[in-house]
Image: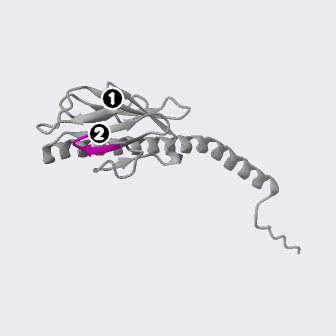
């Protein structure tokens, strides 16, 4: 009587089908993952701006002096926060309350709407700015953007028409 034992393992066809399925899944997942990472980077930069504007407003009231947030726009953007006068974010130690610049990998640009002389001024009595302004970050080569709206009374809100979870700008 002959005994046949079944061999354990995969056939070459089963392995090839498995590799094809994995390849298809990776092809579908990678672009979504890249978009996810870029949107999270954009969200982080925008929310940092939001918190820094809230900080500048509270410092104006606390110190009883006008606090300036001065911007340099474009792809090599930065901004600085200083009490009493404008500062230059590209010059070390001129902004007493801090500066923010992007890392090279952030791949964003900064633009301003209704910001006079590239600076916001929070007044000391109520933290008001007396103008409605928007600071917008946009991803390179994409239409994805997020903004921070500042009301005349100094209220600060994050907004986006292209990233879900935020009110439209």
Closest to the observer, 98 or 147: 98
Closest to the observer, 115 or 85: 85
Residue 82 lies in the magenta stretch = yes
Between discs 2 and 1, the one toward the N terminus: 2
Q: Position of residue 157 (x, y in %)?
A: 28, 35
Q: CA distance from mark 2 to mark 1?
A: 10 Å
Residue 19 sits above or below residue 139 on the image: below
Image quadrant containing the C terminus: top left
Closest to the observer, 87 or 29: 87
Q: Position of residue 111 (x, y in %)?
A: 41, 30
Closest to the observer, 31 or 28: 31
Q: Residue at x 32, y 50 (%)?
A: 98
Marks 2 & 1, CB-CB < 8 Å contact? yes
Q: Position of residue 71 (x, y in %)?
A: 37, 37
Residue at mark 1? 117
Q: Position of residue 93 (x, y in %)?
A: 35, 52
Residue 117 lies in the magenta stretch = no
**At numbered mark 2, what does the secondary structure look like: helix, strand or loop?**
loop
* Colouring used for the render: one colour
Q: Quadrant of residue 167?
A: top left
Residue at mark 2? 86
Q: Residue at x 76, y 55 (%)?
A: 15
User: In the figure, is residue 83 to the left or right of 163?
Assistant: left
User: In the figure, is residue 148 to the left or right of 107?
Assistant: left
Which residues make up the magenta segment? Answer: 80-86
């Amino acid at each position: 009587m002959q005994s046949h034992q079944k061999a354990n393992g995969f056939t070459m066809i089963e392995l090839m089908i498995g590799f094809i399925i994995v390849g298809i899944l990776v092809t579908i997942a990678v672009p979504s993952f890249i978009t996810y990472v870029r949107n999270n980077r954009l969200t982080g930069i925008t929310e940092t701006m939001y918190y820094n504007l809230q900080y500048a407003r509270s410092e104006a009231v606390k110190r009883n002096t006008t606090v300036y947030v001065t911007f340099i726009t474009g792809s090599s953007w930065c901004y600085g926060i200083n009490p009493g006068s404008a500062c230059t974010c590209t010059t070390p130690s001129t902004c007493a309350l801090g500066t923010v610049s992007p890392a090279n990998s952030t791949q964003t640009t900064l633009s301003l709407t209704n910001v006079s002389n590239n600076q916001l001024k929070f007044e000391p009595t109520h933290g008001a700015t007396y103008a409605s302004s928007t600071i917008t970050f946009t991803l390179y080569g994409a239409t994805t953007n997020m903004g921070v709206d500042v009301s005349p009374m100094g209220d600060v809100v994050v907004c986006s028409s292209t990233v879900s979870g935020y009110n439209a700008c």
